[in-house]
Image (tube, rainbow, N blue to C red):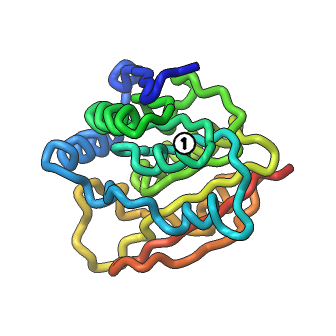
């Protein structure tokens, strides 16, 4: 059994990344060096709480969080009976998540690596739940098929994917720090990329810019 906060390290730099991927990595690192990133609020979103604790709650099983940041939601899942693995591209985020998991006294398998290259990490699955808070929408579009394939290969029959993402940048808005971030994510894109999954729900977020909660289910 892994100890609380067990972390596995890969070296994302060991796999050649193109210019767009490097831009994403540098931008994310700057957010963490500057302080708390805007997506890492320290508060578990009510959408995940409803899925885990609500009237039609998914029973605890194995969960994988993509882009776990400093571990807020991975720790929440572990506290509610889930066997949790969590991955993030930024090493300082994983280090902080490990510290927080140890302080909380829960076991979370923390992995430093790339959510689009899960084959390089020891996360064979199958998983019953995938959680993604702003990870997928930050991935360059040319790497998103690899992300979808990695999850699909590791999904148990009937597995859920709960994803929060920013919508496409409206025409005329300032260009974001990383060019590909303007693409955002849409329901049509997820339907096309996630073969063998059903898009169960799309709920607009409450942010001042277009955001959405997407719920997908792997075919049984």
In this view, 146 is above or below 192: above
What quarter of the picture does the N terminus occupy? top right
Residue 103: horizontal and vertical position, in percent?
35, 36
The answer to whether residue 22 is visible is no
Going 42% across and 79% down the picture, which residue do you hit? 206
- 171 relative position to 65: left or right: left
The one of 9 and 108 positioned closer to us in this rendering = 108
In this view, 206 is above or below 118: below
Going 50% across and 29% down the picture, which residue do you hit? 109
The answer to whether residue 158 is visible is yes
Going 60% across and 67% down the picture, which residue do you hit? 50
Mark 1 closeness class: few <14, some 14–19, many ≥20 residues within 10 Å: many
Label 1 sits on a secondary structure element that is: helix
Residue 163: horizontal and vertical position, in percent?
54, 59
- 145 relative position to 67: left or right: right
The one of 118 and 172 positioned closer to us in this rendering = 118
Q: Which residue is mark 1?
A: 78
Residue 122: horizontal and vertical position, in percent?
56, 22
The one of 203 and 182 positioned closer to us in this rendering = 203
- 12 relative position to 142: left or right: left
């Amino acid at each position: 059994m892994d100890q609380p906060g067990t972390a596995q390290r890969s070296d994302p730099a060991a796999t050649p990344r193109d210019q767009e991927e490097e831009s994403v990595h540098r931008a994310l690192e700057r957010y963490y060096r500057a302080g708390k990133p805007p997506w890492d609020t320290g508060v578990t979103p009510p959408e995940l709480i409803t899925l885990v604790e609500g009237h039609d709650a998914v029973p605890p099983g194995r969960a994988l969080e993509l882009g776990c940041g400093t571990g807020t939601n991975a720790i929440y899942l572990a506290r509610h009976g889930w066997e949790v693995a969590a991955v993030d591209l930024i090493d300082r985020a994983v280090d902080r998540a490990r510290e927080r998991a140890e302080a909380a006294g829960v076991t979370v398998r923390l992995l430093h690596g790339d959510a689009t290259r899960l084959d390089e990490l020891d996360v064979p699955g199958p998983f019953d739940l995938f959680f993604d808070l702003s990870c997928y929408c930050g991935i360059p579009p040319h790497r998103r098929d690899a992300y979808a394939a990695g999850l699909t290969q590791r999904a148990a029959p009937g597995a859920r994917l709960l994803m929060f993402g920013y919508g496409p940048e409206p025409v005329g808005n300032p260009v974001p720090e990383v060019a590909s971030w303007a693409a955002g994510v849409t329901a049509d894109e997820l339907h096309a990329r996630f073969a063998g999954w059903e898009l169960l729900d799309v709920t607009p977020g409450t942010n001042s810019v277009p955001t959405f909660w997407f719920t997908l289910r792997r075919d049984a």
